[in-house]
Image: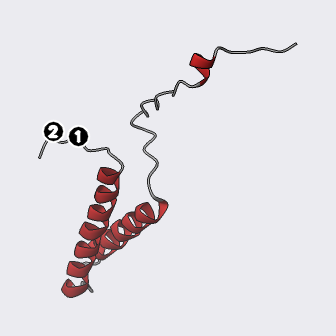
Amino acid sequence: MTCTLPDDLVDQLCPMPEAPPGCIGLDATLGRRLATAKARLDRMEREVVSRDLSALAMARVEFALAARALADDLIARGLHTPGESD
């Protein structure tokens, strides 16, 4: 038994389905960088006695840079709608 489809149906393109918000598909490297920076920052902020303010400042900067890199990647993937909060 064979089945044939009309040519006009075969050549139709299927639109990409809208991905649910939970299925973003984060870049693992960027996610790992952000998680590592957050864990380091948390650890350094808990160290009250031996706090190195210079190292703490560097940890805060790394956390901000990691968050920015992840946000840039999400924007590049089209998760930012222009005009919402520009």
* Residue under the image location 58 percent in, 18 percent down: 9
Residue 19 vertical position relative to residue 55 in the rendered view, above or below: above
Q: Which residue is mark 1?
A: 81
Q: Nearer the viewer, residue 67 or 36?
A: 67
Rendered location of residue 44, percent (x, y): 30, 76
Q: Quadrant of residue 33?
A: bottom left
The three-letter code of the residue at mark 1 reads Thr
Q: Which residue is mark 2?
A: 84
Rendered location of residue 70, percent (x, y): 33, 59
Quadrant holding the N terminus: top right
Q: Nearer the viewer, residue 71 or 39?
A: 71
* Residue under the image location 26 percent in, 72 percent down: 45
Give the structural element (helix, strand or loop) at label 1. loop
Judged from this view, the residue extending furthest toward the right is 1
Crowding near the residue tagged with mark 1, few <14, some 14–19, many ≥20 C-alpha atoms within 10 Å: few
Callout count: 2
Give the structural element (helix, strand or loop) at label 2. loop
* Residue under the image location 46 percent in, 65 percent down: 29
